Amino acid sequence: MGRYTNEIELVNVDGLSDFERIESNLRALIVSIAGTIPGSRGFGLSGNSTDMRPEEARNAFYEELDEKAEMYVPEIRIEDVEFEHNADGTMALRVYVEENGDWEGDEDD
């Protein structure tokens, strides 16, 4: 499939008001490898999709990211994921983020 890069674009589909914080949290989730964060071993992605064919990789990445976002950034949902192949063999990633209408948030805010 190629190598990932730090070319990660997060697209705010719904005009979320606190998107800077959400973007920071989601970007950290994407670039972290699961099992490497002491005290939060589940945070991050497995990286298993890097050895798959492009469409399989996109689907696996989407499913894992959506599942992890539900756990760690519950106010959003992953609407879609796109990979772009760069000439140098790396991949650019575009993640479309929307509001999770089912999330009720913290009532104490």
Image: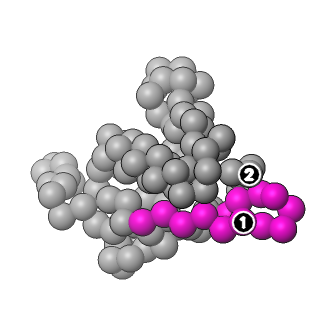
- Residue located at (32% from left, 59% from top): 77
Q: Amino acid at mark 2?
A: Gly
Q: Are marks 2 and 1 in contact (CB under 8 Å)?
A: yes
Residue 90 in view here: yes
Q: Residue furthest top?
A: 38
Q: Give the camera-side residue of 58 and 19.
A: 58
Looking at the rendered structure, the secondary structure element under dot 2 is loop
- On whether residue 91 falls in the magenta region, the answer is yes
- Disc number for residue 85: 1
- Residue 90 falls left or right of residue 14: right
Q: Give the camera-side residue of 16 and 63.
A: 63
Determine crowd level at label 2: few under 14, some 14-19, many 20+ residues with C-alpha closer than 10 A: some
Which stretch is magenta? 80-92
User: What x and y, as percent, mark residue 18?
Assistant: 38, 67
- Residue located at (65% from left, 41% from top): 51
Please name the residue that numbered disc 2 is placed on: 2
User: What x and y, as percent, mark residue 29?
Assistant: 51, 45
As measured in the structure, the alpha-carbon distance from the residue carrying label 2 to the one carrying label 1 is 8 Å
Q: Give the camera-side residue of 64 and 60.
A: 60
